Amino acid sequence: MLADEAQSLSSLIVIHKGEVYRQSRAVLRIALSLGGIWILLASPLFIIPNLLRDRMYAVVARHRYKLVGKSQICRVPTAKEAKLFLP
């Protein structure tokens, strides 16, 4: 199932220390990994039940281009950043 999800590109999946995080849990895992202010911003979201957070994630994902716009150009990751992505 994980391979099917990864191929569909319909959701965010993060694998951290062998644990798989999907949707809102993946966003929170990324925020915790970034550290600093992101930990403070993400921490209150942990009290929201996972089901509700995932529904909020789905709404934001569905309307993301309205919220942040869409670019015709993608930034190419640096060599250091590219090592963080799966082949």
Image: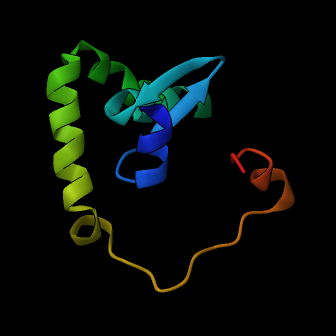
- Position of residue 29 measured from the top left corner of the image (x, y, whole percent): 49, 27
What residue is at 21 percent from the left and 29 percent from the top? 53
Q: Is residue 83 left or right of residue 41?
A: right
As drawn, 60 above or below 53: below
Identify the residue at the far bottom of this view: 72
Q: Is residue 64 left or right of residue 20?
A: left
- Position of residue 66 measured from the top left corner of the image (x, y, whole percent): 21, 71
- Colour logic: rainbow
- Position of residue 61 measured from the top left corner of the image (x, y, whole percent): 26, 53
Of residues 68 and 77, which is closer to you in this image? 77
As drawn, 46 above or below 72: above
Q: Is residue 63 left or right of residue 27?
A: left
Identify the residue at the far right of this view: 79
As drawn, 65 above or below 31: below
What residue is at 43 percent from the left and 42 percent from the top? 4
Residue 37 visible? The answer is no
Q: Quadrant of residue 69?
A: bottom left
- Position of residue 1 measured from the top left corner of the image (x, y, whole percent): 41, 32
Q: Is residue 38 left or right of residue 87?
A: left
Number of residue marks: 0
Residue 58 visible? The answer is yes
What residue is at 53 percent from the left and 26 percent from the top? 32
What residue is at 58 percent from the left and 28 percent from the top? 15
